């Protein structure tokens, strides 16, 4: 097939806060592909649950969240300033509201609810049906697109990831504590990898990218080599 016109699915899975979104955005821009941040979708459902009685006093009410699902309409709109799509819930832009520590603390619990996953996985498959997407998440190469042509499993040391997240939140002006962030990173790794449904795991045919001590440029060089290999198959 023609190397340049052949559109593929790039599945990007891995641990939280290891720069998946930055990497995915850069790849998508380079290839003219659509970037889909599936974590933002799970975060949006979590936010909606927090605001509409699905999580009360720190208790995640599974039945209530399942009952809320039909009311949640998630859409993406491309934002040229960010070079990525912003996420909307029922028409409301929630990009800023979904990245708080409160949402982060509950998102693993919400994303382990079977009905939540069924709804979001179906949406993701629909969005990638024409290929030409870079989809970032936890189960893209294993569940959403097991037939993805290129599967990357991204990781970095927990301390390095917490440092990056800390700097990001500080830059936004959030009053955050490093220890709390490190705990959240470790707790989410554990919850994501051990949950019963679609746990985070490397697909057998995924290639590992540990970017603990890599610059963005080095990661892009690595990616170019992987892409060339896949397209020459
Ligand atoms: O990528 P992120 O940190 O924004 O993702 C937030 C949470 O959503 C993460 O703790 C796990 C969950 N998630 C998931 O279960 N499946 C996905 N495909 C993407 C994210």
Image (cartoon, grey):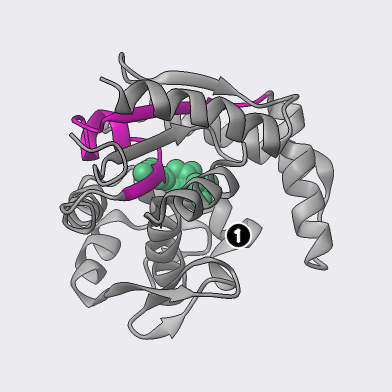
Residue 105 position, x and y percent, is 57, 50
For residue 200, say whether it is visible: no
Magenta-span inclusion, residue 136: yes
Residue at (29% x, 50% y) in the render: 132
Please state which of residues 106 and 192 is positioned toward the viewer in this rendering: 192
Q: Quadrant of residue 164?
A: top right
Spot occupied by residue 2 in the image (x, y as percentages of width and height): 22, 38
| Above or below, comparing residue 45 to residue 118 in the picture | below
| Location of mark 1 (residue) | 102
In the rendered view, tell whether residue 161 sits above or below residue 134. Answer: above
The boundaries of the magenta stretch are: 133-156
> Percent from the top left, x then y, of residue 81?
60, 75
For residue 231, which quarter of the picture?
top left
Ligand 1 - quadrant of the structure image: top left
- The foreground one among 69 and 171 is 171
| Position of residue 165 in the picture relative to residue 97 (left or right) | right
Q: Look at the image and say whether residue 199 sits in the magenta stretch.
A: no
Q: How many marks?
A: 1
Q: Quadrant of the N terminus?
A: top left
């Amino acid at each position: 097939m023609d190397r340049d016109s052949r559109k593929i699915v790039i599945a990007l899975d891995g641990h939280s806060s290891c720069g998946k979104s930055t990497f995915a955005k850069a790849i998508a821009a380079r290839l003219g592909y659509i970037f889909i941040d599936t974590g933002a979708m799970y975060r949006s459902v979590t936010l909606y649950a927090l605001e509409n009685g699905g999580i009360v006093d720190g208790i995640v009410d599974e039945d209530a969240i399942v009952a809320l699902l039909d009311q949640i309409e998630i859409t993406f709109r491309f934002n040229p300033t960010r070079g990525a799509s912003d996420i909307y819930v029922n028409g409301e832009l929630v990009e800023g509201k979904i990245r708080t520590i409160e949402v982060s603390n509950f998102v693993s619990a919400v994303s382990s609810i079977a009905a939540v996953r069924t709804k979001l996985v179906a949406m993701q498959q629909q969005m990638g049906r024409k290929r030409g997407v870079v989809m970032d998440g936890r189960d893209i190469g294993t569940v959403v697109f097991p037939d993805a042509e290129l599967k990357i499993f991204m990781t970095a040391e927990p301390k390095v990831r917490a440092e990056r997240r800390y700097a990001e939140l500080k830059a936004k002006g959030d009053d955050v504590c490093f220890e709390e962030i490190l705990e959240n990173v470790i707790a989410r790794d554990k919850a994501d990898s051990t949950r019963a449904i679609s746990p985070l795991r490397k697909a057998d045919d995924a290639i590992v990218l540990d970017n603990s001590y890599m610059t963005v440029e080095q990661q892009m060089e690595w990616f170019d080599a992987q892409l060339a290999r896949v397209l020459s198959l």
